[in-house]
Amino acid sequence: MAKLSLFDRRRRRVRTALRARASGKPRLSVHRSGRHIYAQVIDDAAGKTLASASSLDKDLKGSTGATRDSAAAVGKALAERAKKAGVDRVVFDRGGFLFHGRVKALADAAREGGLEF
């Protein structure tokens, strides 16, 4: 078996801790790349995505997705779509990324939009 990178080890550690605390709540998963940020609310029990948003969406697309402002816009849009899907409480899965910068901006905007975590 190949040796895991530090990022993959951190992602596994975060995901394992979330499973222990989730208690049936959907998971708000975040992925960030150099140019964009993506977020989705996932029901792990059913294996389905309930809501998603990214900086590539037509209504959110700006000059670039690599800013805190675009991450906040994605967070607000995700919270709005999750509310329409009937989700108000989630567990935040930072996916191995540090809770800082764009990831934190997305989380704060989702909280302002009405999601609880």
Image (cartoon, rainbow, N blue to C red):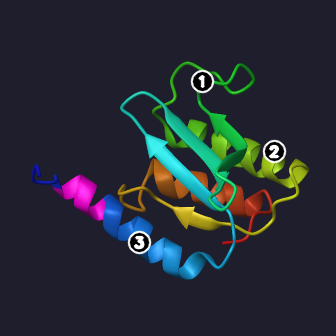
Q: Is residue 102 left or right of residue 86?
A: left
- Does 63 appear above or below 10? above
Q: Quadrant of residue 95?
A: bottom left
Membership of 7 in magenta stretch = yes
Q: Residue at x 51, y 81 (%)?
A: 20
Q: In this figure, which residue is indicated by the disc labeled 2?
A: 81
Q: Residue at x 41, y 59 (%)?
A: 100
Q: In this figure, which residue is indicated by the disc labeled 1?
A: 56
In terms of depth relative to the viewer, which is nearer, 58 or 109? 58
Q: Whole-percent x and y of residue 96?
A: 35, 57
Between marks 3 and 2, how big is the CA–CA gap?
26 Å
Decide: few, some or many residues near mark 1? Use Cα within 10 Å; few <14, some 14-19, many ≥20: some
Q: Quadrant of residue 71?
A: top right
Q: Please, what secondary structure does the residue beneath circle 3 have?
A: helix
Q: Which residues are magenta?
A: 6-10
The kind of residue on which mark 1 rests is Leu
Between marks 1 and 2, how big is the CA–CA gap?
16 Å
Mark carried by residue 16: 3
